[in-house]
Amino acid sequence: MISLTDKPANYSAICDQIMKMDPKIRFVGIINNKGRLVEGGMKEGVPTLSSPKEDEMIFMELLLRIKMRQEFDAQLGKVKFALALREKILEMSFQIDNHVLFVVSEPDEGLTLPKKISQIISGYV
């Protein structure tokens, strides 16, 4: 598992590499444990589907889901990544220590992106 607290320069590298891996990726960001975006953002030229206030709510809801899932880590193992396939987007979240890598792509991408992103993350260990 990556320790981003030990390697803060990796935030940018991880976000950049993931953003470039597929043209259908809309957003890549690192969210801290307070629900704040600390690195990354929307791809240039791509229209946002939510307001900045809605983004804050999305990040907080994401953290709540992650904390709820952690309640079962001892019994089921740690979550590698989580997906939410919506009508307009595919949301992916990956826990990295006490941070969350949040990636949003077009919904027709399918489910190959999470595994590719996991490989990128493991390269920063």
Image (tube, grey):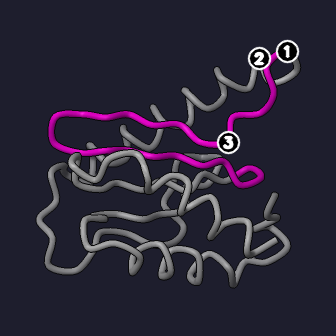
* Label 1 or label 3, whichever comes before in sequence order: 1
What is the distance, in whole Å, between disc 1 and disc 2 at their CAs?
5 Å
Question: Could you tell me the amino acid type at mark 2?
Answer: Phe
Measuring 59% from the left and 42% from the top, which residue is drawn there? Answer: 81
What is the distance, in whole Å, between disc 3 and disc 2 at their CAs?
13 Å
* Label 3 or label 2, whichever comes before in sequence order: 2
Above/below status of 71 relative to 56: above
Magenta stretch: give its range. 75-98
Question: Could you tell me the amino acid type at mark 3?
Answer: Lys
Give yes or no for residue 80 being in the magenta stretch.
yes
Camera-side residue of 22 and 72: 22
Position of residue 82 measured from the top left corner of the image (x, y, whole percent): 53, 37
Dot 2: element: loop
The numbered disc on residue 75 is 1
Crowd tier of the residue under label 1, counting other residues whose Cα lies within 10 Å: few below 14, some 14–19, many 20 or above: few
Measuring 56% from the left and 36% from the top, which residue is drawn there? Answer: 63
Crowd tier of the residue under label 2, counting other residues whose Cα lies within 10 Å: few below 14, some 14–19, many 20 or above: few
Crowd tier of the residue under label 3, counting other residues whose Cα lies within 10 Å: few below 14, some 14–19, many 20 or above: few
57 lies left or right of 66:
left
Measuring 81% from the left and 27% from the top, which residue is drawn there? Answer: 77
Q: Which residue is mark 3?
A: 80
Position of residue 113 measured from the top left corner of the image (x, y, whole percent): 44, 56
Give the quarter of the image for residue 31: bottom right
The numbered disc on residue 72 is 2
Camera-side residue of 68 and 2: 2
Position of residue 13 measured from the top left corner of the image (x, y, whole percent): 59, 83
28 lies left or right of 93:
left
8 lies left or right of 12:
right
Report how many numbered discs are placed on residues in the image.
3
Give yes or no for residue 1 being in the magenta stretch.
no
What is the distance, in whole Å, between disc 1 and disc 3 at their CAs?
15 Å
